Amino acid sequence: MATKEDVQDPRIPKIASSIRVIPDFPKPGIMFQDITTLLLDTEAFKDTIDIFVERYKGKGISVVAGVEARGFIFGPPIALAIGAKFVPMRKPKKLPGKVISEEYSLEYGTDKIEMHVGAVEPGERAIIIDDLIATGGTLAAAIRLLERVGVTIAECACVIELPVLKGREKLGETPLFILVTSDAA
C-alpha cells in the first residue's frame, strides 16, 4: 500500500501497515481490505481518527454522515471531536420512522441508502465518511441524498482508496480525502 495524501505525516505508514489484505474474500478475485486489524491496533486507530479530526476541526462542519457499516466506526468519534452531529446513512429498512432514500447502481442491480427525515437541515455543512472507496456508487448516492435536502458537502473522507476502480470519478466536484491507497482490488 502506498500513501495518497499527507505523505509527510509519519502516522500514515503505520496506518497503512495495520490494514490486512485478504485474497479471494468474499469471492474469488477480490482482495478484501480488512480494517479490523487497524481497529485492533490502538495507536493506528487513534492516529486515523486524529488525522481526520485535525483536518475538519474548526472548518464549520455541522454533520458527519457515516455510510453503513464501517462509516459508523469512524464517524462518531470524529463527530464528537469536532462538535458535529453524527448522521447514519443506512441500507433500506434499517431505520425506524420516516426516511428519505437515494437509489444507486450496483454491478448487478440497484440498492438504496437512507437517512431519517429531519436528521439534517438545509444550509448545514457535512463530511461523508466511510472506510473505503471502490466504485464510488455508495458515496455518490450519499452526496445526492444530502444535497437534495440542502446540505453542502465539504468533502468525502475514506481511510482507503482503490484507485483502479475509479470511484473518485463518480463523486463529481466533491473533494475526496483519503489516507491510504491500495493497488489491491
Image: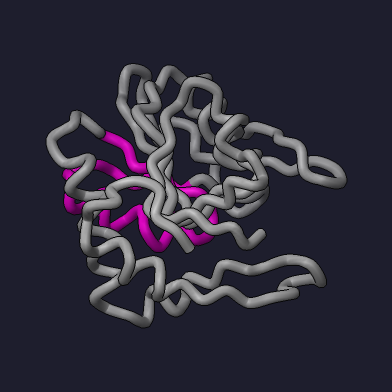
State how the image is colored.
Answer: one colour
In the image, is residue 85 part of the stretch drawn in magenta? yes
Q: Which residues are magenta?
A: 62-88
In the image, is residue 71 part of the stretch drawn in magenta? yes
Taking the spot 43% from the left edge, 17% from the top edge, the residue there is: 150
Where is residue 139 shown, x and y percent of the image? Answer: 55, 39
Taking the spot 81% from the left edge, 45% from the top edge, the residue there is: 107
Q: Is residue 157 above or below residue 102?
A: below
Taking the spot 86% from the left edge, 46% from the top edge, the residue there is: 108
Where is residue 162 shown, x and y percent of the image? Answer: 58, 51
In the picture as drawn, the residue positioned furthest to the left comes out as 58
Q: Is residue 82 above or below residue 60?
A: below
Where is residue 176 shown, x and y percent of the image? Answer: 43, 36
Work out whether residue 107 or residue 87 is closer to the camera in this orientation and state it.
107
In the picture as drawn, the residue positioned furthest to the right comes out as 108
Q: How many marks?
A: 0
Where is residue 60 shown, x and y percent of the image? Answer: 19, 29
Instruction: Give the image quarter of residue 141.
Output: top right
Work out whether residue 140 or residue 55 is closer to the camera in this orientation and state it.
55
Q: Is 58 left, or right, of 173 in this rendering?
A: left
Taking the spot 36% from the left edge, 53% from the top edge, the residue there is: 75
Q: Is residue 82 above or below residue 147?
A: below
Residue 98 seen in this snapshot: no
Q: Quadrant of the C terminus?
A: bottom right
Q: Is residue 29 above or below residue 135?
A: below
Work out whether residue 158 or residue 4 is closer to the camera in this orientation and state it.
4
Residue 9 seen in this snapshot: yes
Work out whether residue 123 or residue 131 is closer to the camera in this orientation and state it.
131
